[in-house]
Image: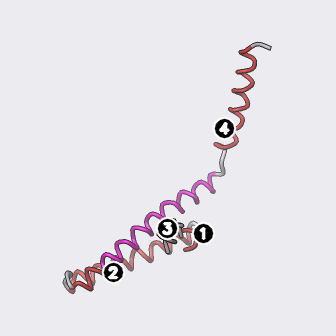
Amino acid sequence: MSWLDVKGSELDRIGDGLSRRVNADPERLEKGLAQLVLTVIELLRQLVERQALHRVDAGSLSEAETERLGRSLLALSQRMDELKREFELTDSDLNLDLGPLGKLM
């Protein structure tokens, strides 16, 4: 057996392994991507909400700004709920373990 035969069979084996990994279920890929994106959005939503509460508590927002911010956060929360239902995700699916910081939610 020549060196080329050995390398050729090795490449075939690697190619077979790669094709099995790449041929993923599109539905699972879509759900996984949605889970990742919604997790990032949820993290940002919680950070913005905490910052907004600090600003409200500090009195640095006008009444109109507070009202507008509240409506925006409520609309975002409702849209998140819609997207979680659409992709059959729960809050626990978006709950990342942030190591020493604990769980996201």
Per the image, label 4 sits on a secondary structure element best described as: helix
Q: Which residue is mark 4?
A: 18
Percent x, y of residue 30: 57, 56
Q: Are marks 3 and 4 in contact (CB under 8 Å)?
A: no
Magenta highlight range? 26-53
42 shown above or below 34? below
Mark 2 or mark 3: whose residue is earlier in sequence: 2
Per the image, label 1 sits on a secondary structure element best described as: loop
3 shown above or below 58? above
Q: Which residue is mark 3?
A: 100
Distance from Cα at disc 1 to Cα at disc 2: 25 Å
14 and 88: which is toward the camera: 14
Q: Are marks 2 and 3 in contact (CB under 8 Å)?
A: no
Name the residue at 33% across, 81% down.
Answer: 71
29 is within the stretch colored magenta: yes
Per the image, label 3 sits on a secondary structure element best described as: helix
Mark 1 or mark 2: whose residue is earlier in sequence: 2
* Badge 3 amino acid: Pro
* Badge 1 amino acid: Glu
* Badge 4 amino acid: Leu
Which of discs 2 and 3 lies nearer the camera? The answer is: 3
Q: Which residue is mark 1?
A: 88
Distance from Cα at disc 3 to Cα at disc 1: 29 Å
Residue 79 image-quadrant placement: bottom left
Distance from Cα at disc 4 to Cα at disc 1: 29 Å
Q: Which residue is mark 2?
A: 71
Name the residue at 69% across, 32% down.
Answer: 14
Few, some or many residues within 10 Å of mark 4 (<14, 14–19, 20+): few
Percent x, y of residue 53: 31, 81
Apparent side of residue 59 relative to residue 51 in the rendered image (left or right): left
